[in-house]
């Protein structure tokens, strides 16, 4: 199972992204990304990362789709990697279309990319 820990619920993913997730991991389960105050200290982010590590372990995923606020993602990724839990991010192509003077920006899913190991 792929645990989706991002600000983008899997219910809003494209068919291509859902198909890639199901092919690689079976099912997808969402864990909403936490709201991290801009005023939060590094220590507060570390505590939140520990709390979310527990939530991830309870879900027992095959891999974690992890994207969001950089310091939290880094703190949680380090913890997940220490436990040999694979982490992936989505890659996408950005396309810009102009219609009647209005720019329409789309991000088209390409693949899941594994986080490099330290």
Image (tube, helix red, strand yellow):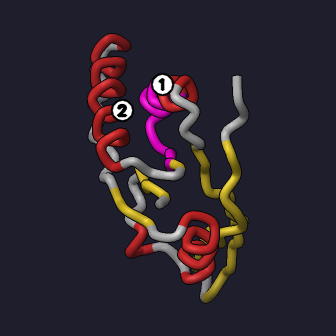
Image x and y of residue 79, in percent: 48, 25
Q: Which residues are magenta?
A: 64-77
Q: Residue at x 32, y 24 (%)?
A: 50
Residue 65 visible from this viewpoint: no
Q: Was residue 35 drawn as part of the magenta stretch in this picture?
A: no
In 3D space, how far apart are the residues under numbered discs 1 and 2 (Cα atoms)? 7 Å
Q: Residue at x 30, y 43 (%)?
A: 58
Q: Residue at x 70, y 52 (%)?
A: 113
Mark 1 element type: helix
Image x and y of residue 118, in percent: 70, 22
Image x and y of residue 19, in percent: 59, 78
Closer to the camera in the image, 102 or 5: 5
Mark 1 crowd level (few <14, some 14–19, many ≥20, 10 Å Cα):
some
Q: Is residue 63 above or below residue 34?
A: below
Indicate which disc residue 53 carries.
Answer: 2
Residue behind mark 1:
79
Residue at the extreme bottom of the image, as rendered:
100
Position of 35 with respect to 22 (left or right) is left
Q: How many marks?
A: 2
Q: Tell me the quarter of the picture where residue 8 sits.
A: bottom left
Q: Earlier in the sequence, mark 1 or mark 2?
A: 2
């Amino acid at each position: 199972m792929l645990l989706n820990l991002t600000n983008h619920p899997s219910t809003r993913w494209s068919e291509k992204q859902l198909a890639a997730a199901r092919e690689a991991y079976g099912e997808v389960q969402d864990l909403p990304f936490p709201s991290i105050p801009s005023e939060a200290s590094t220590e507060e982010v570390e505590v939140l990362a520990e709390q979310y590590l527990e939530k991830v372990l309870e879900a027992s995923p095959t891999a974690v789709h992890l994207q969001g606020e950089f310091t939290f993602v880094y703190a949680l990724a380090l913890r997940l990697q220490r436990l040999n839990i694979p982490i992936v991010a989505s890659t996408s192509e950005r396309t810009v279309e102009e219609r009647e003077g209005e720019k329409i920006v789309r991000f088209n899913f390409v693949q899941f990319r594994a986080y490099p190991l330290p």
